[in-house]
Amino acid sequence: GMHEVLKMSDTTMTLPRSNNKGSHQLWKNGFIINCIVVFLLPATATADTSSNTHFPLTNGSNPDFQTILFNESLNFRKNVCNLHQQYDNRSVPLADVLRGLNISTVIRCPHLYCNTNSDNLLDQDDPGLFVVLLEELAERAGFYWRDSYALVNNKYMGTNTSFDELLFWETKTYDLAVSWWTETTRRIRKGVDFPQGWYEADIIMVGKSSNSDEGETGEFQFDTFLKPFRVGLWVAIVLTIVLSGLAYYLLEVLDHRSDKKHLEKRPVESIIITAIAFTTHFEYTPRTTAAWLFALSVSFWAMIVASAYTANLASFFVVQNTPGLQIQSVGGAVAYGYPICLMGKTGIDTVLTGDFRSGNFIRKPSDTEALQGVLDGDCKVAALSKGSWEHNQRDYCELEWIGRKYKQILAGFATRHDSGTKCTSLISEVIEIHFRDMIDEGFVKNAWEDHLKKISGASTCSAELELEESDIESQRLTFKSMAGIFICHAAISILVIAFTVVAKYTGKIQERNERLEKQEIEQLKKAALENRELRKTVASEIRKSNYQQEDTDSAILDVGGASSDDEFSVMGVQETIYALRSQMQRSQNQLSEEIRKTQHAQKQDISEIKDQLRSTQQQMKEQMASILLALNQVEC
């Protein structure tokens, strides 16, 4: 029978000897007992005979504590009623009542938190988080477990065997079941006792990640506006602005009539004007062909670069702000009809199925397969424990925690509730005390953080994040992708400057300036002559008006002498005279106002001409005397 059991096992079992005295004889006796038991029992001792024909032996350092999985004929639980009596008599404190006791322990291993070696026994170098906590608990409580433990691999449970059945069997067969068992009402009713939990089994949802809330809850990113262009392109833009500003300044130095602002002594202002052009605002005031061509080149370059920047920045915002799932709870996911992946036949499965009978739950063999189901599109979200997500998130960088916790649950070790037969409830009470101390002192938290640090080295997120960064980097424009517009602008700038230099040293610029200055002098003289003629005309009109007034006064006197007896006629003539005088006065005032406006406009024209002439004093000293003479004539 034992031969058949070993033959049907999925793994080769090894039964090493213990180093304790008399262990060899115990091993022989245990082996004989097991052979008798197996011989008497059917070879199909299973919890579910419909789908599982055979179960393997449990592993352990001591074969006396090995048995067939789900075999309820053997029981390794200790009778601690005498210890309970000592505690009731107050002869031993509750925290020390287990001191010196060898407790039978079953550990779910291999597991996320438990590691085995090549012999399927606990790895001595890195046994895992379960063993770290169990060792600390044993040291505080003073009990032993190294020579009385068994390892259970839940992959041999079978498709129709639940974790509830595994837990019931473990607590009936061993004193302590080491794993993160979730406390549920069904398990408590079946006689399972749950000491103080240490594992955060809060039910959460995980879905595909998005950066929709990055602007509100993410890290502050100062350089977001710089992301559309790479560093090399930004450097090229700054250099282009500076060099273009200096080039426009050089044009003004070579030809002081290039711009109306007269920038030949203000290079910084020329650079600032070019920088403003980068924002697609035109601040140049060119007057020469070379200056117009250069300004056109700068404006076209700025338009292309600014358009590329705006388009790429918009694409970054659109990609990074794609809305994610708009749900905040499991109830919301159920209400939307979203398929929810979860690990089947677990406490989370029991809780959610009971609370949401209409939920579309897709059961997977493990949490990792539930997470993979979200990536593969089988489910919209996955429901799992917070601790499981913290352990697995390093390998699922495309997923993130969504919404709020559904229920806050602490999971941990489990024992059998027994207060009369073997009094194993005492073990649960002692574990409760020491686990509370371990939590209060921070040991559990530190052990959990150490565990996460150990597994962080195997994270694949770093590579995926690097790939994501490389994807973002590939979307950013480089200098090579924009080199064409830079080369065109540089070529036009060089051509314009060369043309201006050649024109200056061949005398064409000086000839043009002299011609323009002669035209300005002629215009000035013409304006002065027009002003003089206007003055003459105004003076003639005033004289005529005075003559008319004198004639009118004479006529009034004649009329007054001839008709002195007729008062009514005299009054009518006087009213007519007054009306004529008022009309003449208004005409004179209007004429004076027009003269004043004309003189003011001419003064403004003369001021502008003066400014233009002052700017040419250094180059036109020989003609200054004639210009000053002309100005004096105008003023006179």
Image (tube, helix red, strand yellow):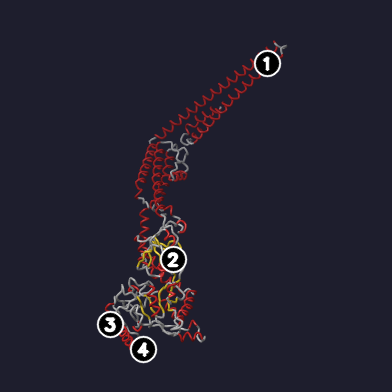
The label on residue 355 is 2
Q: Mark 4 vs mark 1: give the one in front.
A: 4
Nearest to N terminus: mark 4 or mark 3: 3
Relative depth, front residue between 392 and 494: 392
In percent of width and height, residue 81 lies at: 45, 85
| Cα distance in 3D space between marks 3 and 2 | 46 Å
Question: What kind of element bears circle 2?
Answer: helix
> Is disc 4 in contact with disc 1, using a CB cutoff of under 8 Å?
no
Nearest to N terminus: mark 1 or mark 2: 2
Q: Picture quarter containing residue 572?
A: top right
Q: Which residue is mark 1?
A: 572
The residue that appears at 51% across and 28% down in the rendered structure is: 630
Relative depth, front residue between 74 and 66: 74
Tell me the quarter of the image containing the N terminus: bottom left
Judge whether 364 appears above or below 117 on screen: above
Question: What kind of element bears circle 1?
Answer: helix
Nearest to N terminus: mark 1 or mark 3: 3
- Badge 1 amino acid: Gly
Nearest to N terminus: mark 2 or mark 4: 4
In percent of width and height, residue 530 lies at: 52, 24
Q: Specify few, some or many for label 1: CA neighbours under 10 Å numbering under 14, 14-19, or 20 or more.
A: few
Q: Which residue is mark 4?
A: 21
| Cα distance in 3D space between marks 4 and 1 | 157 Å
